[in-house]
């Protein structure tokens, strides 16, 4: 397991979860992910990427929601768990993410190469 894989695993375990508003996909816009996270996602065609970007959406968003929910990138997991990425529907975990962990995740974003999902 690479160091980045270890960091991703560490961060995933520390991002709190919560129940979303059914049918809401406000967090499913164009996002970036590390190469390590991208390797976990199914490859989408250039046309699927272009269509999603034109709609300001994610190529992994399907009719029933996120098609890669278990492998979704850290940025997707952060949505709604911090005031910086607040859910517009007011959904949130009982306890928001620890600010130190949040800062470590942002530092990880800066230190690793990220590409558009």
Image (tube, helix red, strand yellow):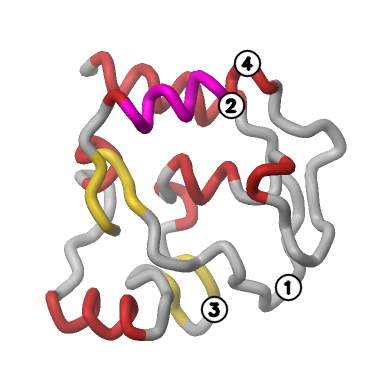
Q: Answer above or below: position of 97 versus 100.
A: below
Tell us which disc is closer to us: 3 or 4.
4
Pointers 4 and 2 in contact (C-beta within 8 Å): yes
Does 36 appear in magenta?
Answer: no
Q: Earlier in the sequence, mark 3 or mark 4?
A: 3
Say if 61 sits above or below 86 in the image: below
Element carrying mark 3: loop
**Region of the chain picked out in magenta, as a range:** 103-110
- The mark that comes first in sequence, 2 or 3, is 3
**Mark sitting earlier along the chain (4/1):** 1
Q: CA distance from mark 3 to mark 4?
A: 34 Å
Residue matched to label 3: 64
Q: Quadrant of residue 54?
A: bottom left
The disc label shown at residue 100, or none: 4
Q: Position of residue 8 (x, y in %)?
A: 40, 27
Q: Which residue is mark 1?
A: 22
In the image, taking residue 109 as reference, residue 39 lies left or right, namely: left
Q: CA distance from mark 2 to mark 1?
A: 26 Å
Residue under label 2, please give it.
102
Rounded to the nearest angstrom, the CA distance separating label 4 from label 2 is: 5 Å
**Viewer-side label of 4, 1:** 4
Label 3 packing within 10 angstroms: few (<14), some (14-19), many (20+):
few
Q: Which mark is residue 11?
A: none
Q: Element at badge 1? A: loop
């Amino acid at each position: 397991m690479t160091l980045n894989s270890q960091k991703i695993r560490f961060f995933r375990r520390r991002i709190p979860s919560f129940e979303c508003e059914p049918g809401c996909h406000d967090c499913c816009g164009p996002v970036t992910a590390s190469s390590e996270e991208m390797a976990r996602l199914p490859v989408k065609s250039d046309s699927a990427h272009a269509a999603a970007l034109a709609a300001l959406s994610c190529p992994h968003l399907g009719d029933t929601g996120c098609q890669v929910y278990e492998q979704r990138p850290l940025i997707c997991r952060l949505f709604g768990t911090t005031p910086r990425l607040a859910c517009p529907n007011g959904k949130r975990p009982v306890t928001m993410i620890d600010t130190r962990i949040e800062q470590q995740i942002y530092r990880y974003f800066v230190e690793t190469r990220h590409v558009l999902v």
